[in-house]
Image (cartoon, rainbow, N blue to C red):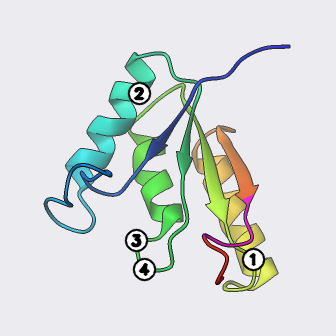
Amino acid sequence: MSIQFLGMIGHRLSSETIAPVGPIFDRDYIVRFAQTHEAAGFDRLLVGHWSDQPDGFLVTALAGLSTQKIHYLLAHRPGFVSPTLAARKFATLEHLLGGRLAVHIISGGNDAE
């Protein structure tokens, strides 16, 4: 059994202890974050799904095109995008990233969802 190290990328600087800073979609932050994780030897970055945040497909595309080796795990919540469109978007992004994409199917972010 092998171990993989995963990080989680956001769309701008923020955390449980740091209030959101900068634009809602901070390109420089996304690129820097992805490249730093790749340089540190992480295997994969999770791109989460939030209904009130920038599109994960585009965050993944930007991060993926700025790196060479690290893989991406893109969270997808079925029901908001037609299945055929979602499949086409995943296939296109997977090809664009040279096979470095995996999909994480989720049911929601909290009990109310």
> What is the secondary structure assignment of the residue under circle 2?
helix
Q: Earlier in the sequence, mark 1 or mark 4?
A: 4
Q: Which residue is mark 2?
A: 37
Please say if 98 is above or below 92.
above
Please say if 95 is above or below 55.
above
Examine the residues drawn in magenta and state their main secondary structure: loop
CA distance for labels 4 and 3: 7 Å
> What is the secondary structure assignment of the residue under circle 3?
loop
Please say if 55 is above or below 59.
below
Hey, what amino acid is under mark 4? Asp
Mark 1 vs 2: CB contact within 8 A? no
Q: Which residue is mark 3?
A: 54
The residue that appears at 69% across and 61% down in the rendered structure is 90
Q: Position of residue 31 (x, y in %)?
A: 31, 42
Q: Nearer the viewer, residue 110 or 68?
A: 110
Q: Earlier in the sequence, mark 2 or mark 4?
A: 2
Residue 34 appears left or right of 71: left
Q: Nearer the viewer, residue 104 or 88?
A: 104
Q: Earlier in the sequence, mark 1 or mark 2?
A: 2
Hey, what amino acid is under mark 2? His
Q: Position of residue 25 (x, y in %)?
A: 27, 64
Q: Quadrant of residue 22?
A: bottom left
